[in-house]
Every structure is written in C-alpha cells, then in structure tokens.
Image (cartoon, grey):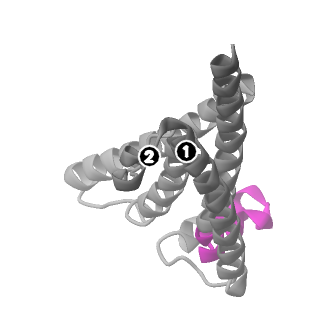
Amino acid sequence: MKRISRLYERILAFGAGLMMFLVFAIIFVNSMRRYTTGRSLEWGEELPIYLMIYGVMFGIGLAYLNDRHIRFALITDILPEDWTQKLYAATDIVTMVTGAALAWSGILFATRRPQIDASGLIGTARALAESTGLSWLEWIGRVGTWQSAVATGGVLLALAAFIRFLTRLQEIRAGVQDQAA
C-alpha cells in the first residue's frame, strides 16, 4: 500500500507543481509582454485562473493523502489513541463519499453548458484549431473544459481518501498486533 500511496503522492505533487509553474510562467510572460510591448496576451488573464483551480484540486488530494489538512482536533485530543485512529478512518469514509459527490456535481456542472465560450480563450482556441486543421482543439476555449476541474478534484479527493483509509487500516492493525505482542 505504501508504494501505491507514494506513487499517487508523486502524481498529485507533480500536478499541483505543474499548475503552479504554468500560472507563474503565464503571468510572468504576460506581465513582461505588457510592459515591453504595451499589449498582453488575449488568454493571459483568464487561463491562470482556470489552471489555479486545477492546482487547488491536486493540492487538496495531496493534503488529504498526507494527512496534512486542516482538522478540528478538539474531540480527537481527548480520545484515546485507538479511538482517534478509528474516528480518522470513519472520516476517511465520509471524505470518500464527499469526493464522489463533488465529482458527480462537477460532472453535472461541466456538462450542463459545455458549449459556452470562455471569452478570453475562445479566440486563441479557434485560431489554434484553424492553423492546425484540428477542429477538436476548440475545446480549450470552452468553459466546460475548465469547469470539469471540480469533477477532477472530486475524483482526486475520493481516491486520496480511499488510499488513506487503507493505509490507516494497516496502521490500526499493526498497532493491534504490537499491543498483542
């Protein structure tokens, strides 16, 4: 389980890091262009916002997987350790359900109006589609593409909670075996 957890952790960390790098790079290039030429990129204002949402979604999965998220510890601080671990396992189950509900909600949200244009991106997306002859590239300029970040985040969170739950069960079992020995 540790191998799977480490692999998933690396995927989430890479995704979050890549989104942060892209946001920084786009804002930097757009700022430099604005100050040197007086014009900014058509998509330079809107795309970083969408990428940041994806970055946050990778980040919530990573934080939950590493058990480094915000937690109200008032109750858990007064419980015995074995009860605390069981409560955390129950929280993992609730988080899995919440992640699945978030994914479903995101799917409904993104598919309800996928044809709406993202005003700052559609011009560039259409130009890219025309210049390459690949009409499917217009999806980059649609709002539904970027609204699907909520569904992606739900899946990432549910999977992180599932892996954390299995890891926690192993830790609970190992603790029981240590106490028996």
Q: Measuring 69% from the left and 19% from the top, which residue is drawn there? A: 180
What type of secondary structure mainly makes up the magenta span? Answer: helix
Q: Look at label 2 and name its amino acid.
A: Leu
Q: Name the quadrant of the C terminus.
A: top right
The residue wearing badge 1 is: 83
Question: Would you place residue 156 above or below residue 181 in this image?
Answer: below
Q: Measuring 70% from the left and 86% from the top, which residue is drawn there? A: 112
Q: On the picture, is 75 further left or further right than 31?
A: right
Q: On the picture, is 67 further left or further right than 164?
A: left
Q: Position of residue 144 (x, y in %)?
A: 65, 75
Q: Position of residue 172 (x, y in %)?
A: 65, 33
Q: Which mark is residue 125?
A: none
* Label 2 with label 1: CB-CB less than 8 Å: yes
Q: Name the quadrant of the N terminus.
A: top right
Disc 2 on helix, strand or loop? Answer: loop
The residue wearing badge 2 is: 79
When asked about the image quadrant of residue 132, the answer is: bottom right
Residue 83 falls within the magenta-colored stretch? no
Q: Which residues are magenta?
A: 126-148
Question: Would you place residue 6 above or below residue 82 in this image?
Answer: above
Q: Position of residue 56 (x, y in %)?
A: 47, 54
Disc 1 on helix, strand or loop? Answer: helix
